[in-house]
Image (cartoon, grey):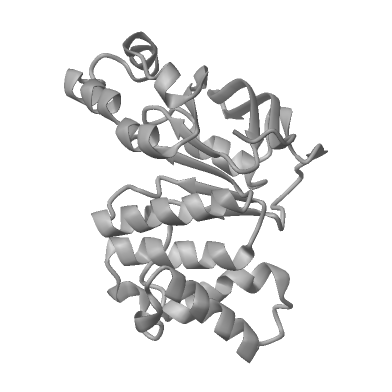
Amino acid sequence: MSSLPPVLTCHNLAVHYDNRSALRDVNLEIKRGQITALLGPNGAGKSTLLKVLAGMIPPSHGAAKFEGEELSGPHANITYVPQRSDVDWTFPISVLECTLLGLAGSRSRWKPFSRHDKAVAMQALKDVRMDHLAQAQIDALSGGQQQRVFLARALLNNGDVLLLDEPFTGVDVPTQDMLVDLLTELKSRGTAIVYATHDLAQAARTADYAVLLNGDIVAEGSPHDIFQQDVLLRTFGGSVISVESLREVAAS
């Protein structure tokens, strides 16, 4: 476990949408070289928390900070990967062009991407085994291939923090395995990784730290310490957590 100071922190964080409370009194530390899983039912606030940490949503109360400085918008050292369902995959753009957009935040909008930029993007696509489809249109990709393009874009940012919303959902097993390998490699470089998931067993296998969320934090700690039946029932409810899923987590 990382002994370095936290790179991201939340202090008494709350987010309200009109009269609905999405997050309440969240206090959290995200450390470098650590994989953190956010788990909870639909509507628990996982996506909202990721967007606050990415500087995309301002908190209603409290604060989110990067290295002690309060976030007031997107940060160059924080990379956010949304759910695939949040993206218009019918936009007429190639895999390479889509990947190059990962550099857009650090380039003038009027300056074309250089030959070096394209070479770096091709290397990122090679790292996720998508270089052979560089000229394909994104609307022709499978779910697993789309997720790999997202990962290639994230690699171009080379930031201190990587935030992923449901990265394992709806993708094939090879893509899941590749994602785990990639996250493990980034962790070894000191990257702080936070991902949202519904998959308890996947989190038990891959995360160093888990946060059980349902509006507020129900529990946090090592997955093997907090994935207990009473805690999971308080987080997800009895209709969601089955005996089989608990056994799978225990075996992970």
Residue shown at the point (76%, 45%) measured from the top left: 72
Any part of residue 113 in sight = no
Residue 188 place in picture, x, y as percent: 57, 50
Is 221 displayed left or right of 111 in the figure? left
The N terminus, quarter of image: top right
Residue shown at the point (28%, 75%) measured from the top left: 140
Is 58 displayed left or right of 95 in the figure? right
Any part of residue 97 in sight = yes
**Which residue is outermost to the left?**
244
Compared with 43, 174 (above or below) is below
Is 132 displayed left or right of 192 in the figure? left
Compared with 3, 180 (above or below) is below
Residue 199 place in picture, x, y as percent: 32, 35
Residue 134 place in picture, x, y as percent: 41, 82
**Which residue is outermost to the right?**
69
Compared with 40, 103 (above or below) is below
Compared with 89, 131 (above or below) is below
Residue 26 place in picture, x, y as percent: 62, 23
Which one is nearer the viewer's eye here, 207 or 115? 207
Which one is nearer the viewer's eye here, 235 or 159? 159
The C terminus, quarter of image: top left
**Which residue is outermost to the bottom?**
115
Which one is nearer the viewer's eye here, 2 or 25? 2
Residue shown at the point (32%, 12%) measured from the top left: 229
The mark total stands at: 0
Corner quadrant of residue 200: top left
Residue shown at the point (50%, 80%) measured from the top left: 122
